[in-house]
Image (tube, rainbow, N blue to C red):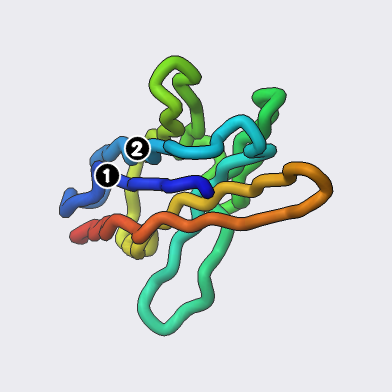
């Protein structure tokens, strides 16, 4: 099992910044990638950013150039630095881990953290 705990959400004005954290614990050695997803009211959950075991990253077009995903292996934590925030970034942000171990794939989700951007 893998446990994921998000933190760092809040209310900021448009143009501001936030840094989200996703702390992973448990059976983390089988994790292939960790990503951030978000879900706005009335919308489907969407992938925002992803970082793989090798360190490669990718981003949704809507956040490229504004968001940066990174990790601190010593702390088992993945971060999402969000700059130049817009009202349309308002959503619950979820951390997700993709595990593949002994031929079995598993997915783990955190409980989410609310991000609200005021105009």
Percent coordinates x, y for residue 110 in the rendering: 41, 55
Vertical position of residue 9 compared to residue 70: above or below: below
Question: What is the number of the mark on residue 54?
Answer: none
**Earlier sequence position, callout 1 versus callout 2:** 1
Q: Label 1 belongs to which residue?
A: 7
Question: Is residue 49 shown left or right of residue 77?
Answer: right
Please name the residue shown 57% across and 42% down the image: 34
Residue closest to the eye, 76 or 67: 76
Which residue: 66% across, 56% down?
A: 106
Q: How crowded is mark 2: few (under 14 residues within 10 Å), some or many (20 or more)?
A: many
What SS does tag 1 mark?
A: strand
Residue 30 lies in quadrant = top right
Distance Cα–Cα, label 1 vs label 2? 5 Å
Q: Is residue 74 left or right of residue 46?
A: left
Q: Tell me what residue is drawn at x 33 percent, y 47 percent.
A: 6
Instruction: Identify which residue is drawn at 21% across, 60% down.
Output: 119
Residue extending furthest bottom?
Answer: 42
| Residue 1 image offset from top left, x and y in percent | 53, 49
Which type of secondary structure does the marked residue at label 2 adopt? strand
Residue linked to disc 2: 21
Name the one closer to the observer, 67 or 104.
104
Q: Do the residues labelled 1 and 2 touch (CB within 8 Å)?
A: yes
Near-viewer residue (8 or 4): 4
Horizontal and vertical percent position of residue 89? 37, 58
* Residue 10 rendering spot, x and y as whole percentages: 19, 51
């Amino acid at each position: 099992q893998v446990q994921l705990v998000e933190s760092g959400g809040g209310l900021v004005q448009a143009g501001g910044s936030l840094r989200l954290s996703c702390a992973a614990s448990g059976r983390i050695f089988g994790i292939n990638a960790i990503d951030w997803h978000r879900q706005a009211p009335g919308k489907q959950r969407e992938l925002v950013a992803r970082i793989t075991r090798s360190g490669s990253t990718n981003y949704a077009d809507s956040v490229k150039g504004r968001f940066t995903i990174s990790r601190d292996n010593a702390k088992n934590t993945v971060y999402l630095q969000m700059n130049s925030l817009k009202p349309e970034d308002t959503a619950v942000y979820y951390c997700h881990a993709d595990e593949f171990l002994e031929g079995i794939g598993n997915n783990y989700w955190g409980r989410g953290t609310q991000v609200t951007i005021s105009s």
